[in-house]
Image (tube, coloured by chain):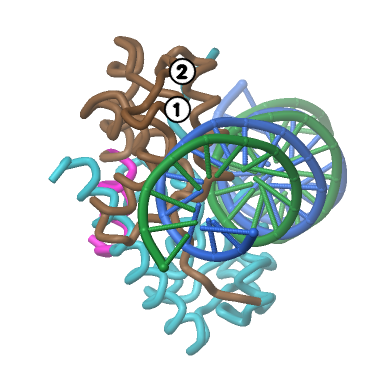
Chain colours: A cyan, B brown, C blue, D green
Amino acid sequence: MAERAPDLLPGTLDMLVLKTLARGPNHGYGIAQHIHRISGEALTIGEGSLYPALQRLLVNAWVRAEWTASDTGRKVRQYSLTAAGRKQLARETRDFGYLVAAIARVMEGA
Amino acid sequence: MAERAPDLLPGTLDMLVLKTLARGPNHGYGIAQHIHRISGEALTIGEGSLYPALQRLLVNAWVRAEWTASDTGRKVRQYSLTAAGRKQLARETRDFGYLVAAIARVMEGA
DNA sequence: ATCGATACCTCGAATGTCGATGCCTTGAGT
DNA sequence: ACTCAAGGCATCGACATTCGAGGTATCGAT
C-alpha cells in the first residue's frame, strides 16, 4: 500500500560512484557519505546497493581497489578511478543526459 | 559484457504512461507510439514493459480500461486516467524532479 | 495468399535496489 | 571496565522492473 519514492533512480548508482571517485580515491563508506551530503541528503546509498555496485565497477575495471591503512592505522579499502572508468563516466553522463532530455520532452507534452 | 544504453530510465515508465493518458484516453499500442514519437525516437517502450506497467496502473486504479471498437470496427482496449491517477502523476512528477535535481548536484560536483 | 503494421498479452531471464544480518575496529561516554 | 555508537567491509534473500521472445489475431495492400 505504500507509495514510497525510491531512494535512487535505478541505474544511476554506478554513474554517481564513478563521479565521486573522479574527485579522488575514496573508500566505500566515504563514497556513500559524499553522495549523501552533496546531494543535500536527498540520495541515500544503502550498503546493500553500494558494495554490489563497486563489485560491478571492479569487474569492468572501471575502478581499482587497494587495501590501505587509514590515518588512524585502520585498514580500509581504497577505490580509485581507472582511465577506462573515466571514459565510462563520460559515456554514462552523456547517456543519462539524453534520457532525461527525452523524458522531459514527454513530460512537457510538446 | 555489452555496455548498451538502456531504452528507458527504470522506474519512469509508469509516469510516462500516466502523462500520455493525461492528454486523453488511448490504447496500449498508441501509448507506446506516442512516447516514442514525442521523445524524438529516443524512448522505445517494448510491449513486454508496457503491458505489465498497464496492469500495475490498473491494479492501483490509476487508470481505467474499457474494450471499445475502433473506427475500423476492430476491438481495442482503451485506457483512461482516473482522478487518483492524476494525483499519482503529480506525485511521480514531483519526486522525479527531486531525484534528478539531487543527481545533478552530485554530477555538477558543487 | 502473404506480408507488414496494428493490437493484445504472457513468460522467463537478467538486472538492480533494499533491508537485514554478520563481522570487526575505534573512540567516546559512564 | 563496560557499553554503545559510528565507522568500515561485505553478503544474502526478497522484490520490482525491464526486456526479448513468443503466441494470437485483425486489417490493408500487394
Residue at 44% from the left image edge and 46% from the top image edge:
A9
The residue range painted magenta reads B98-110
Q: Kindly report the secondary structure that dominates the magenta region of the rendered protein.
A: helix
Residue B105 vs D6, above or below: the answer is below
The quarter holding residue B71 reads top left
Q: Which quadrant: the C terminus of chain B?
A: bottom left
Mark sitting on residue B76: 1
Q: Position of residue A77 (x, y in %)?
A: 65, 69
Q: Position of residue A29 (x, y in %)?
A: 56, 55
Q: Are marks 1 and 2 in contact (CB under 8 Å)?
A: yes
On the image, numbered disc 2 is attached to which residue?
B67
Q: Position of residue B24 (x, y in %)?
A: 24, 25
Mark sitting on residue A70: none
Q: Amino acid at mark 2?
A: Trp
Tell me if mark 2 has few (under 14), some (14-19) or many (20+) residues whose alpha carbon lies within 10 angstroms of its own. few
Q: Which quadrant: the N terminus of chain B?
A: bottom right
Residue A40 shows in this picture = yes
